[in-house]
Image (tube, rainbow, N blue to C red):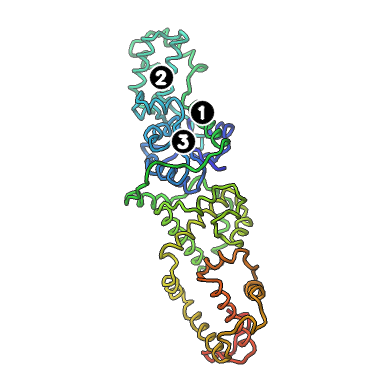
Amino acid sequence: MSVFIFTGPTLSAADAGAELDAVYLPPAGEGDLYRAALRRPQAIGLIDGLFQLVPAVRHKEILWAMSQGIHVFGSASMGALRAAELWPFGMEGVGVIFESYRDGRLEDDDEVAIAHGPSEVGFVAASEAMVDIRPTLRRAEQDGIIPPEVGTALERIAKQLFYPTRSYPQLLNCALESGLPAAILARLEQWLPGRKVRQKREDALTMLRTIRTRLDEGLPPKNVPYFFEHTSMWECARYETRRQRFSGAPDGDAESVLRELRLQGATKYRHHRFLAAARELALLEANRLDLQSAPVAATRGEEPLGERPGLNIYTPSKNCLIDSGVSEDERARLMTEEARIEWVHARSGIGRKENLIDELRLCGEYTRLRVRAEDKKRVLDISGSKNSSLADVGMTEETLLRWYFVDVLGESVPNDLAAYLTELGYETADALFRTLLDEYVFRHHDAAGGVVSSRGAEPRSANSF
């Protein structure tokens, strides 16, 4: 189970955590929900969001998240606004405030807007939301603290205040200056501390309980009634968003690991950076295609991780994930991404032979490998071993595989040989065995010293590559 919740001044992460086990993030700004969706959670809950000085959460990123099978819930504040706007498309709104926006009883954004402090002080609220003030005044009327006409006047004054200055002390001061009875206002002031309505908070708690119930009942991937359109504006926005760091991703020892990698030199660092870039491009392409393939869907199942159908991630990769100490949710996300990347590679020009040859030329490996290939052909031709069979060298497929993986590479034989073939671009298993057998014969003759390489050098050792 994985859920991300954006909250702040409406409900603290500590209070929210008592209702629902989730990853709690600061109020969402532009791109934050998209970055959360990239982690492939089951659900995202939007309570608080940034606006005015920071661009607000895009409608498009919510639509994209839902199109990827992620349930998106909204309530209380920015979440209620976006849910009221997107509920026809499948965003799930929860609470009184959402319903008021959806049904047209509320229209203005400032109804939920407040000023608040930074994360260092827990996003403490510095003003009151109109959606909290209005029911508070109704309660005061019901309790006999203020007459209805005073309540109506106070509501009108509160609505006229600029949202960052909208507070009960400011409201009472303005009301006194407007000529409302001082005695009634004093009585209201005494009543407020213990009787204020906190509708935003209540709606947020209701949303968390709703998500918890839905998860307990079993939450299948989200189905949406629309086709997500990849516009040029969306692609540009998404590219910029992915360049920024996801605040909810646990860093752990990531930076210290990167420092150790840098110490291994520029060549190795560039190699891994290149692979990371290729991974990023493949994922972008998978997302552009809205890839909803069987391998991706399979990761939502209940099979033990690493044994799910359609995930052609061979055993070394799985073991690496286990050894790296990531959580099961992170492992599931990484394996899902690997399936998406493999799907893209198999159906596009990414990783095609021409590009691989160009890369070898650019990195300086092409000449060395070409010369070795020429040496091998020369050895096989001269020795008459070009078409040797396994029987000719006294081996079986199993012993040949063990020789190559264990003796030459120092690895274990892959459990999923079919996935290994796909990973390395072998068209058939016969092509793999032909390649390994030629290598075995080449090393055997070359190590025996019977043939000189095409460059006139001494024969290389049996373990050179």
Q: Quadrant of residue 321?
A: bottom right
| Vertical relation: 231 (above or below) 423 | above
Amino acid type, residue under disc 3 in the picture: Phe
Residue 352, x across and y down, in percent: 43, 69
Q: Which residue is mark 1?
A: 206
Which residue occupies 37% across, 17% down? 155
Residue 406, x across and y down, in percent: 66, 72
Q: Is residue 209 left or right of residue 113?
A: right
Going from the N terminus, do you reach mark 2 or mark 1 first?
A: 2
Count residues near mark 2 (Cα–Cα under 10 Å), then give few for <14, some for 14-19, many for 20+: many
As helix, strand or loop, the secondary structure at mark 2 comes to: helix
What is the number of the mark on residue 240? none
Q: Which residue is mark 3?
A: 73
Count residues near mark 3 (Cα–Cα under 10 Å), then give few for <14, some for 14-19, many for 20+: many
Q: Which image quarter is the N terminus in?
A: top right
Of badges 3 and 2, nearer the viewer stands 3
Q: Is residue 126 left or right of residue 330?
A: left
